Amino acid sequence: MSDFIWPSEEGKSKSLDEQDRAIVLATQAGLPLVSDPWTAVGEQVGMSGEEVLSRMQAMLERGVIRRIAAVPNHYRLGYVANGMTVWDVADADVERLGREIAAIEGVSHCYQRPRHLPHWPYNLFAMLHGRTREEVEQQAQVLRACLGEACHGHRILYSSRILKKTGLRLAAANLQTASTETDARG
Amino acid sequence: MRNKDGINEVELDADDRHVINRLQDGLPLAPHPYALVAGELGLSEAELIERLARLRDTGVLSRFGPMYHAERLGGGLTLAALAVPEMDYERVAGILDAFPEVAHNYRREHALNMWFVLATETAERIPEVVAELEAATGLAVFNMPKEREFHVRLHLAV
C-alpha cells in the first residue's frame, strides 16, 4: 500500500535545503489558483517556475509532500457523522489487521496507537465519515467482520462539537530545524 | 439548507462535484496543472480555477494545496485526550484554545470527552506541551502518538 510508511520508509526523507523550506513556507496555506502556480510560487521565493516544480516533485517522491489536493469540509458537504472507531486488537495481529481495515473503502485515516490501561484498551483507530450515524455504523460492521476473533472490543466516538480547528501550520522556526531532524533519522 | 449542526450545507452543481471528487485525488505536478485537470473534466482552465476559488472561499474546501508530512518536516504530531468533568468543560476548552500547539479539538462522547491534535515545531516539544497542558488544566493527558500509520487519505464522494 503506497500510503503505508512505517517503519521502513520513515528515515528515508533527505534533508530539506533552504530553497525547499522557502517553498514549504510559501505554500503551506495553499497553492495559488492561477494558470502557472509554480511560477507564482517562484516569484515569492526567488526561483523559476521550473525549479519550484522540480523541487516539489522531489518532495513528493520523498514523501515530504503527501499530495497536492483539495481538502473538503466534511460538514459543508453533508458528512455530519464523523466517527472515530477504536478497536482493541491482539498485539500479535494488529499490524496485519491494521493494513487490512485501512484498505476498506471509507476509512480515511488508520493508525495504531498506545493503550492506556485500564481506562483505554483500544490500540487501533480508523476514521469513518457518513451522512448519518447509521451509515457509519454499517461501515463499522464491515471493519468488525474483518477483524474477527482478534478484536476484543470496540467503540465509535462521534465528534459532537468542534472546539477548535486551525489546521496545521508550520512555523519558520520549525523548518530551520527540519534538516537536522531528518539527517539524524536518515 | 441547514443540517442539524446548524452549518449551512451548500448547493453544489454537477461540475462542482466533479471538481471536488477529482481534486481530492491530487493535482498533477506538471506545467499548467489546472489546464490538465480541466481537460479531464471537460471544463476550461479559467472555469476550473473560478470554481476552485469559489469552493475554497465559501468554505466547501478547507484548503487547497500541498499536504505536508509534518514529521518529515521535523515537527511533532500527536493525538491526545482528556476526561473533563462536565462542569469544567468550557473552562478547559478555553485553556486548550489558547495553546497555539492545539491544532484541532473535538468533543467526543466518551469518558474521554475532549480529543485534540498537538502539532509542535519539533518532536521534542510534544512532551513539554503535554506537561504544560496538565499543569494548566489539572487533568491527566492521555497521549496517543501514532505507533504505526496504515492509511491517510480522506476521500469524501460528493
Image: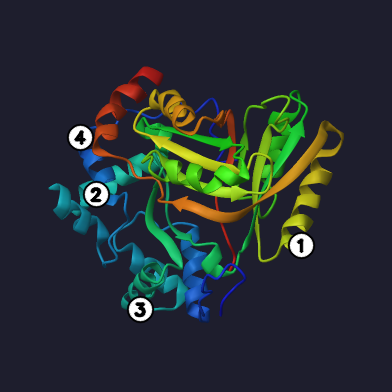
| Tag 1 secondary structure | helix
Q: Nearer the viewer, mark 4 or mark 1?
A: 1
Q: Nearer the viewer, mark 2 or mark 4?
A: 2
* Rendered image: mark on residue B47: 3
Percent position (x, y) of residue A174?
Answer: 29, 33
* Rendered image: mark on residue A134: 1
Alpha carbon separation for disc pair 1 and 2: 42 Å
Q: Chain of mark 1?
A: A
| Tag 3 secondary structure | helix
Alpha carbon separation for disc pair 2 and 4: 12 Å
Q: Is residue A94 left or right of residue B32?
A: right
Q: Chain of mark 3?
A: B
Residue nearer the viewer, B128 or A20: B128
Contact between marks 2 and 4 (CB within 8 A): the answer is no
Q: Chain of mark 4?
A: A
Alpha carbon separation for disc pair 4 and 1: 49 Å
Q: Can you tell which quarter of the image residue A90 is in?
A: top right
Q: Is residue B23 left or right of residue A175?
A: right
**Mark 2 lies on residue:** A26
Q: Are marks 3 and 4 on the same chain?
A: no
Q: Can you tell which quarter of the image residue A138 is in?
A: bottom right
**Mark 4 lies on residue:** A18
